[in-house]
Image: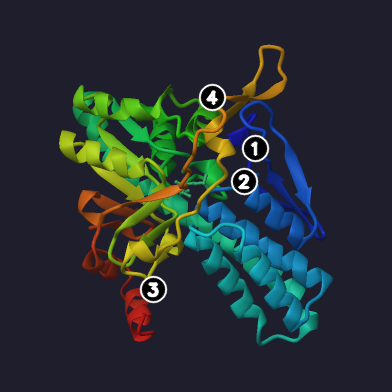
């Protein structure tokens, strides 16, 4: 996507042993690029959500193994860095996928060859993410175009941030929106604010604005009302992990949007790059749901009129808080899963039809 008219990825290699990221905790108020030089710095950036979004978490972790191998390419260092990075966030399966992909390429190599191989593997993961998302965008764009042909404009609702910032480029849920807009198709996006961290209000709104896409931020509770009033044509969300049976784990609140969409007859699509599909799990109850800090609920962060960062309290001191980061949308509420290979029915059979080898390999594992 363009930042100040310049094509920009969300992560890039800025020098020998230097990984550059956009610090998403500073957006939308400041565009800050940070340079990371060690696996520990990469782990901290993921854990503190300077980078976030399932595909970007995976790509960032892959570069973390590169930095680790530059420092010490022993088997012990590889295992230690893999464990450190894997522990940063529990729900998005792209993290494990990316770490296992890079580590798998390194294990048979002599230590002297590992840093270069890790860099190549991380670059490949980043490039593959861009290609996957571009392909998802072409499938989603066709859905948007069809609505716009019928109605003159398509209205899309999205939750959290599954856009450019959540990936290396293009986004998943927003890839079709960018593709449609760039092709001149009229599209407007309803942006769920996505409490508690406000990824919608802060990040989705920022990136859509930077690309010139018409959008309106709404509170999380407004989506059902807008659907009832026929102001939403399509819902597009991302996923942190989709089971082999088509159940979708995504940002907390996704399930409620899917329920409202079903009640109102609004098609509810999940954009799922294949690395977000966990072929080893059929039962979403087995997926760890990240529990995050109560501070995210008891306080809200923003910028004052004077331009200073501030965090203000919104709950009474002493009230108990529960802050699950993700929820499960059952496959039966999902109209389709948009992958790089096309749109699958949200079911084991639907996914296996598009990815027969991966589905069969997981079965062969007995998992
Ligand atoms: O906690 P976050 O901000 O990392 O959660 C992000 C989401 O839930 C996204 O929808 C998901 O990772 C898909 S991103 C393409």
As drawn, which residue projects farthest toward the front?
A: 318
Sequence-wise first label, 4 or 2: 2
Quick check: marks 1 and 2 in contact, CB under 8 Å?
A: yes
Q: In this view, does 282 lie to the left or right of 27?
A: left
Q: In which quarter of the image is residue 184?
A: top left
Label 3 beta carbon within 8 A of ligand 1: no
Mark 1, residue position:
25
Q: Which-is-in-front pick, marks 4 and 2?
A: 4
Residue marked by disc 2: 49
Q: How far apart are marks 4 and 1 (CA)?
A: 20 Å
> Where is 103 relative to 329, above or below?
below
Q: Is residue 129 left or right of residue 46?
A: left
Disc 3 target residue: 280
Q: Dot 4: what SS?
A: loop
Label 2: element kind: loop
**Mark seen at residue 362:** none
Q: How far apart are marks 3 and 1 (CA)?
A: 33 Å
From mark 4 to mark 2, how far is it between C-alphas? Answer: 22 Å
Place residue 244 in its image quadrant: bottom left
Q: Residues within 10 Å of mark 2 (few under 14, many from 20)?
A: some
């Amino acid at each position: 996507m363009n930042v100040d008219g310049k094509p920009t990825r969300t992560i890039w290699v800025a020098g020998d042993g230097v990984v550059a990221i956009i610090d998403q905790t500073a957006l939308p108020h400041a565009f800050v690029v940070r340079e990371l030089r060690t696996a520990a710095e990469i782990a901290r950036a993921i854990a503190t959500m300077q980078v976030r979004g399932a595909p970007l978490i995976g790509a960032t972790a892959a570069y973390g193994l590169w930095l680790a191998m530059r420092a010490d390419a022993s088997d012990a260092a590889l295992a230690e860095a893999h464990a450190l990075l894997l522990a940063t966030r529990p729900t998005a399966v792209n993290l494990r996928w990316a770490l296992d992909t890079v580590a798998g390429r390194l294990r048979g190599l002599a230590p002297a060859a590992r840093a270069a191989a890790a860099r190549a593997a991380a670059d490949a993961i980043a490039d593959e993410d861009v290609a996957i998302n571009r392909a998802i965008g072409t499938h989603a764009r066709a859905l948007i175009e069809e609505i716009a042909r019928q109605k003159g404009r398509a209205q899309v609702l999205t939750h959290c941030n599954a856009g450019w910032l959540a990936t290396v480029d293009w986004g998943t849920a927003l890839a079709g929106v960018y593709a449609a807009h760039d092709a001149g198709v009229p599209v407007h996006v309803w942006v769920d604010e996505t409490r508690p961290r406000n990824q919608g209000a802060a990040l989705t709104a920022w990136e859509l604005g930077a690309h010139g896409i018409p959008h309106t931020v709404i509170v999380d509770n407004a989506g059902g009302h807008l659907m009832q009033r026929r102001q939403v044509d399509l819902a597009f969300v991302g996923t942190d992990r989709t089971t082999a049976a088509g159940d979708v784990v995504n940002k907390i609140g996704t399930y409620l949007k899917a329920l409202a969409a079903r009640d109102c007859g609004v098609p509810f699509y999940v954009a799922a790059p294949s690395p977000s599909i966990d072929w080893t799990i059929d039962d979403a109850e087995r997926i760890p749901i990240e529990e995050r800090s109560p501070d995210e609920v008891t306080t809200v962060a923003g910028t004052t009129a004077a331009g200073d960062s501030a965090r203000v309290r919104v709950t009474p001191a002493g009230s108990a808080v529960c802050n699950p980061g993700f929820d499960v949308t059952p496959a039966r509420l999902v109209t389709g899963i948009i992958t790089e290979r096309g749109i699958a029915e949200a079911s084991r059979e639907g996914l296996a039809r598009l990815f027969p080898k991966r589905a069969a390999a997981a079965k062969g594992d007995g998992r």
